[in-house]
Amino acid sequence: MLNSAEPIVIIGAGESGTRTALTIRQLGWDGPLTLIGEENTAPYERPPLSKQRLSSPDSPVATITTASELHDRRIDFLQGRRAVGIDRTSQVVSLDNDSTLPYGQLLIATGSRARPLPIAGGDHAITLRQITDIERVLEAVRTPRLCVIGAGLIGLEIAAQAWVHGTDVIVVEAADEVLSRVAPPAMASLIRHRHERSGVSFVLGTQAHRIGRHNDQYIVTLSNGTAIECDRVIAAIGSIPNCELATDAGLLVANGIVVDDQLRSSDPLILSAGDCCSFPAAGSHVRLEAWRNAHDQANVAAQNLAGSHISYVTVPWFWSDQYDFSVQVVGTPSAGATDVERHTHDSATFVFSLDVDGVLVAASGLGTGSSAAKTIRAAQMLIEDRCIVDPAALADPTVSLRAIRKTATT
């Protein structure tokens, strides 16, 4: 353990920041520990915002922890406070109430914010990122006609929830297929067809060019000249990492706060975790906007803040709940050269992606409830071991992935 007299300060009370604070205490580190949360609420989970909260708005907020638990663990939680500066020479964090906090080590876990539409009238579009956005989004998904710009995970989840409320939904996507960043084409096509069977319309391969307003209606003009009339517009085109503090402090930033395998920034006393950090993976640096990544990085950050030297190694994993099915994606589908499909007796569908050497690099599953979860977990182990697998065995639903792993070469 490091000198417990040296205070640890964590900026950001989302998944990574809060989990890091709790884990540090679980590890037995008993020094001064401060968690700074900009939102005026207890730390909460963000994934349910586009899932349970839209389908059941009266359901309780899924909290990560409570203010009383943080107090019991001797974590000084500054709720509703914003860090406005970092002085690396003096090792202090400046807050928006003109106070300062000294630190021995610092974790920046400021997350990301919804990317605004960079078009004329883009401010008419609603975004979903924080709990304070829920009321406006709920109103939007209950209107007669809704236009969703962006067919990523969040955009499709919103479209599915709007369908539940009987809304006429049209989704605009600049790419030629939905989920182009996270799912292989075969899986993306299956998901789109499921939406289309529910009545959701898609305009693919074109961008929103302008949003105008006429009386109580919005007119979304696309780059191909098409005009879409609707009652509300929601933008779900990704996020921007909150790196301004790091940039102003002179840390290395490139699509996220650049860290090493131990999550340390260009200043070894400052670590970063979650959506705002760019970490080494597969020979390059990546930034992941995923709950699992934020959660797992918190565990590594806590150990390293407490004096360990643990490397963060991960296989990306995403999930999404839409209608009555769940989508899970593990690995990096874009690294695949060949896709192999598997259809199981319980109507689950899987797409396995192999690279040019036959190594499994990704697996995607689509099924009701948790029907895909077991296979995806087994696939993750194959990916972690960099196994060369037989495509015929992957396609055969009678051959378990556990059996494939026993005979696979690495």
Image (tube, rainbow, N blue to C red):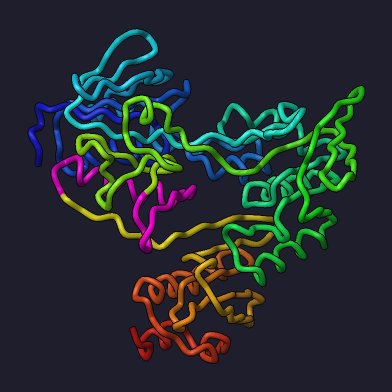
Residue range of the region highlighted in magenta in the rendering: 279-308
Residue 145's image quarter? top right
Residue 77's image quarter? top left
Q: Nearer the viewer, residue 133 or 221?
A: 221
Residue 120 locus on image (x, y percent):
76, 29
Give the residue at x 47% y 66%.
331
Residue 393 locus on image (x, y percent):
51, 90
Give the residue at x 67% y 49%.
157
Residue 256 locus on image (x, y percent):
42, 41
Outermost residue, top direction?
Answer: 98
The number of callouts visible is 0
For the N terminus, the quadrant is top left
Q: Nearer the viewer, residue 369 or 142?
A: 142
Apparent side of residue 250 relative to residue 149 in the rendered image (left or right): left
378 is higher (above) or lower (below) than 326: below
For the C terminus, the quadrant is bottom left
132 is higher (above) or lower (below) than 336: above
186 is higher (above) or lower (below) than 356: above
Is residue 286 located in the magenta-colored stretch of the structure? yes
Is residue 157 located in the magenta-colored stretch of the structure? no
Apparent side of residue 282 relative to residue 290 in the rendered image (left or right): left
Residue 290 locus on image (x, y percent):
48, 50
Apparent side of residue 160 relative to residue 270 in the rendered image (left or right): right
Give the residue at x 46% y 72%.
361
252 is higher (above) or lower (below) than 409: above
Residue 118's image quarter? top right
Give the residue at x 46% y 48%.
291
